């Protein structure tokens, strides 16, 4: 038997369910878009850039241990103090970087 009150409730529940699924789908699409952007080679969050940044930090730590921290890896010149203050992982002087 057709019941307008019941139909109205069912439709409203269906409406709310679809609206929340649309919101979730929009959020997933936005997240996927951001993830795709981060996979662009020139994006700072690309794994290649993160690994390269980590390698530089690890190189700076190694230089601390071997006593060459603050000296340029390429020319051996002292790395400017303000450069090291701004970028503690700097392993090259301003000229060689
Ligand atoms: Zn240098």
Image (cartoon, grey):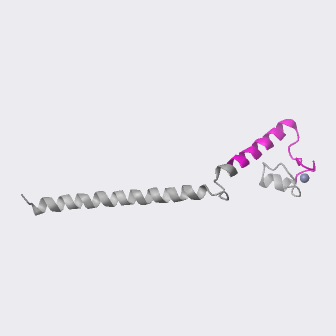
Nearer to the camera, 17 or 60: 17
Q: Which residue is located at x 80 percent, y 53 percent?
A: 85
Tell me which segment is drawn in magenta.
50-79
Total tally of numbered discs in the picture: 0
Image quadrant in which you'd find residue 40: bottom right
Q: Quadrant of residue 8?
A: bottom left
Q: Please check the rendered image and state whether residue 69 is part of the magenta-colored stretch, yes or no.
A: yes
Q: Is residue 16 shown left or right of residue 8?
A: right
Residue beneath the point at 89% across and 58% down: 95
Residue 90 % position (x, y): 81, 50
Say left or right for 4 vs 75: left
In front: 38, or 56? 38
Q: Which residue is at a point 15% across and 61% down the rendered structure image?
A: 7
| Left or right of residue 97, residue 24 in this image | left
- Relative image position of residue 51 (x, y in whole percent): 69, 46
Residue 12 to residue 60: above or below? below
- Above or below 42: residue 62: above
At which x and y percent is residue 42? Answer: 67, 59
Residue 80 location, x and y as percent?
A: 87, 54
- Figure quadrant of the N terminus: bottom left
Q: In the rendered structure, does residue 82 fall within the stretch colored magenta?
A: no
Q: Quadrant of the C terminus?
A: bottom right
């Amino acid at each position: 038997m057709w019941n307008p009150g019941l139909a109205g409730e069912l439709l409203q529940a269906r409406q709310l369910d679809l609206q929340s699924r649309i919101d979730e789908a929009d959020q997933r699409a936005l997240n996927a878009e951001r993830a795709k952007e981060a996979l662009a080679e020139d994006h700072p969050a690309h794994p290649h850039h993160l690994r390269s940044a980590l390698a530089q930090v690890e190189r700076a730590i190694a230089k601390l241990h071997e006593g060459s921290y603050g000296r340029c890896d390429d020319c051996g010149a002292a790395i400017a103090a303000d450069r090291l203050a701004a970028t503690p992982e700097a392993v090259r002087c301003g000229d060689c970087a």
